[in-house]
Amino acid sequence: MELHLTRTTNEADSAYVVNGMIAFNAMHMADDLKGRYEPVTLALKDDDGRTVGGLVGEVCWNWLEVKYLFIDEAYRKLRYGTKLLEEAERLARERKCDFIKLDTLSFQALDFYRKQGYEVYGTLPGAGRHTHYYLKKELTS
């Protein structure tokens, strides 16, 4: 049998790869961490119920990973980003996570995350002609 490589946008193909990786990883995880996966979405809404920002991530094993944090321009610098991260931290502690990790580009929110107690543990220069920063905040201390 010969295998064929194809480009695809088929969700079933994507799910096969993701689920296969999850199953493989689970074989190597401590028993108390197996099955610890939970999507996280925190929505920031105005008085009319319109979403104006939020945070999207996932609890995975012993950490919470923030994939996206966005707030409409009109609501920035009003501490809503801080409130979103504080709520994510509460959720992570409830789920017994050891740390939170996230990433940002040099034109985004590096200083904001540092003020929230996140520390850079890696960088990738040249990402879209910017620097990509990887940050983490310990929750166990």
Image (cartoon, helix red, strand yellow):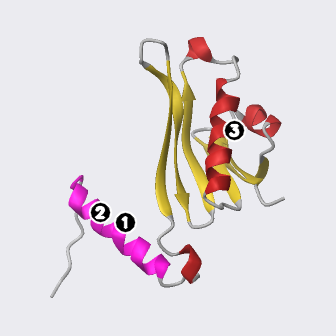
Residue 18's tag is: 1
Q: Which residues are magenta?
A: 9-26
Secondary structure found at label 1: helix
Q: Earlier in the sequence, mark 2 or mark 3?
A: 2
Please name whichever residue, 6 or 27, is drawn nearer the observer in this view of the structure: 27
**Mark-to-mark CA distance, 1 and 3:** 29 Å
User: Hey, which quadrant is residue 84 in on the image?
Assistant: top right
Of callouts 1 and 3, which one flags the residue occurring earlier in the amino acid sequence?
A: 1
User: For the residue marked with disc 3, what is the amino acid?
Assistant: Glu
Mark 2 near mark 1, Cβ–Cβ under 8 Å? yes
Which residue reaches farthest left? 1
Q: Amino acid at mark 1?
A: Val
Q: Which residue is mark 2?
A: 15
For the residues labelled 2 and 1, the Cα–Cα distance comes to 5 Å
Q: Residue at x 82, y 35 (%)?
A: 115
User: Residue 60: where, in percent of width, then height?
Assistant: 54, 62
Q: Nearer the viewer, mark 1 or mark 3?
A: 3
Q: Most extreme residue toward the right, as rendered? A: 141
**Label 2: few (<14), some or many (≥20) within 10 Å?**
few
Which numbered marker is on residue 86?
Answer: 3
Label 3: state its secondary structure.
Answer: helix
Q: Please tell me whether residue 13 belongs to the stretch shown in magenta.
A: yes
| Magenta stretch holds residue 95 | no
**Residue type indicated by callout 2:** Ala
